[in-house]
Image (spheres, rainbow, N blue to C red):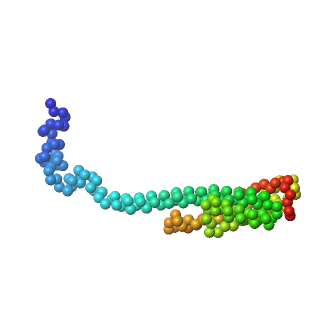
Amino acid sequence: GHRDGDHPQNPRFTATASPQHPTNRIGADRKDHLRMNPLSKERGSTTLEAAIVVPVTLLIILIIVMGGRIAMANQAINAVAFDTARAASLARDVSSAHRIANATATTSLESNGLHCTSQDVRLDTSGLHAEAGTRRTVGATVTCTVELRDITFPGMPSSTTLTATASSPVDPYRERNR
């Protein structure tokens, strides 16, 4: 009873060298060591791989974070434009519409977490000039420049300008001052 490969005469398990099995020698030379342990040939490659993989991975993560932040800021600027157009459409005259729109844009930007280095509000108030009973709208375009310095890296923009336009209907039966 010996199983195949367990026999004491099996050359794979002997400690003596044989010409047919040079890797079984005790005290094999360096070449034999490399043949038996292929990972030892790649000594130092882990450091090189880490030097390449870590920065690339960080770059990908930063791009994903930046993209997510810009997408959220775009949603917020759209909400600000709608709030601004709605507030302006409730005004009774053009000068009130501009004053209300600017105040609403500033408040809405803050409540949506957008910190603009510069902002601009443009209104289309032609709907406020319509006769009672006529369906018209007031439009608002809000532009905001958002800083990205905290998540940017060399070669990427340090800020981005976001613009959104929205319109809101003017109550056709509300009295207006011209």
Q: Is residue 173 left or right of residue 119?
A: right
Whether residue 133 is visible = yes
Q: Is residue 91 left or right of residue 77?
A: right
Residue 33 image point, x, y percent: 21, 53
Number of numbered discs visible in the structure rendering: 0
Residue 175 image point, x, y percent: 86, 57
Whether residue 134 is visible = no
Q: Quadrant of the N terminus?
A: top left
Q: Quadrant of the C terminus?
A: bottom right
Residue 170 image point, x, y percent: 80, 56
Viewer-proximal residue among 51 and 89: 89
The residue at the point 50 percent across, 68 percent down is 154
Residue 68 sits above or below residue 14 on the image: below
Q: Is residue 66 left or right of residue 10?
A: right
Q: Is residue 137 left or right of residue 159?
A: right
The residue at the point 18 percent across, 33 percent down is 3
Viewer-proximal residue among 77 and 106: 106
The residue at the point 16 percent across, 45 percent down is 20
The residue at the point 65 percent across, 65 percent down is 144
In this view, the residue farthest toward the top is 1
Residue 108 image point, x, y percent: 67, 60
